Amino acid sequence: MRKLEIGLLWKENKTFVIFITLMLIFRSALADWNTVPTGSMKPTILEGDRIAVNKMAYDLRVPFTTISLIKLADPERGDIVVFDSKASDKRLVKRVIGLPGDTIAMNNNQLTINGQAITYDEVNQNKGDNSSDRLEHLMGIAHKVHISDINNHLFANFPTVTVPAGHYLMLGDNRDNSADSRVIGFVPREEIVGRSRDVVMSLNYDNFYLPRIERFFSKL
């Protein structure tokens, strides 16, 4: 009688169970979305953005694990990546700045990579909090960064470092308010979950969680 009940239950619900299983496998190994709760990637990513994560950008993994079956590619400079940081015990979203073997330094929020000084164009200035948005020309990749105009020695400067093999140097676009490689160190390749290039949807945390329609399905 018990087996009959279980068999009947399975027959009535197997389509739903298979759907849920496939959806979980899809989200685990192929693609997912991540909620961004902080402003460490402003102005590129805002608090309340839900970003799409391509989990097959770099690896094909065993579902529900971090085991890589096939390496498809390596992160490139300028990529926005999602990674499970053991150092911070959190899932983080940052931008790839340094590749394995690169030498990198920062002086007053200006990067130097492999001896080449990165150039910046001012986009707008916020006199209220002594900060500005600048266009960072990251060796062929142009993107906005938010920088304090007051020299913050804790975050605005670091001496020349060399990125070790199998690791990456990550920075947030909100340069003075990001717990990135300046705090957690270099990020191991195996911690990287995937790459993000799109916002799926966005809720404004400062305005009763109302949707920011203009950010729905927008490019990063």
Image (spheres, rainbow, N blue to C red):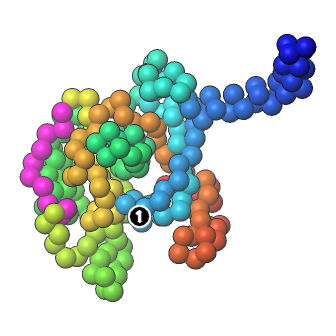
Q: Position of residue 173 (x, y in %)?
A: 34, 59
Which residue bears the numbered disc 1? 39
* Position of residue 119 in the picture relative to residue 124 (left or right): left
x then y, percent, for residue 71: 42, 22
199, above or below 54, in the image: below
Identify the image quadrant of the N terminus.
top right
- From the viewer's side, name the closer residue of 160 and 26: 26
Name of the residue lying farthest toward the left: 159
Query: Which residue is pictured at 29% across the width and 34% down the height?
Result: 188
- Residue segment shown in magenta: 155-164
Residue 100 in view = yes
Q: Quadrant of residue 203?
A: bottom right
**Where, by quadrant of the figure, is residue 146 drawn?**
bottom left
Q: Position of residue 200 (x, y in %)?
A: 61, 53
Residue that appears at 53% across and 27% down:
64
Find numbered disc 1 in the image and state the secondary structure of the residue it sits on.
Answer: loop
Question: Which residue is drawn at the image coordinates 64% and 32% (left, top)?
Answer: 24
Q: Which amino acid, by three-letter code, is at mark 1?
A: Gly
User: Left of 106 or right of it: where is 130?
Assistant: right
Q: Residue at x 48, y 33 (%)?
A: 57
Q: Position of residue 157 (x, y in %)?
A: 14, 60
**Does 163 appear in magenta?**
yes
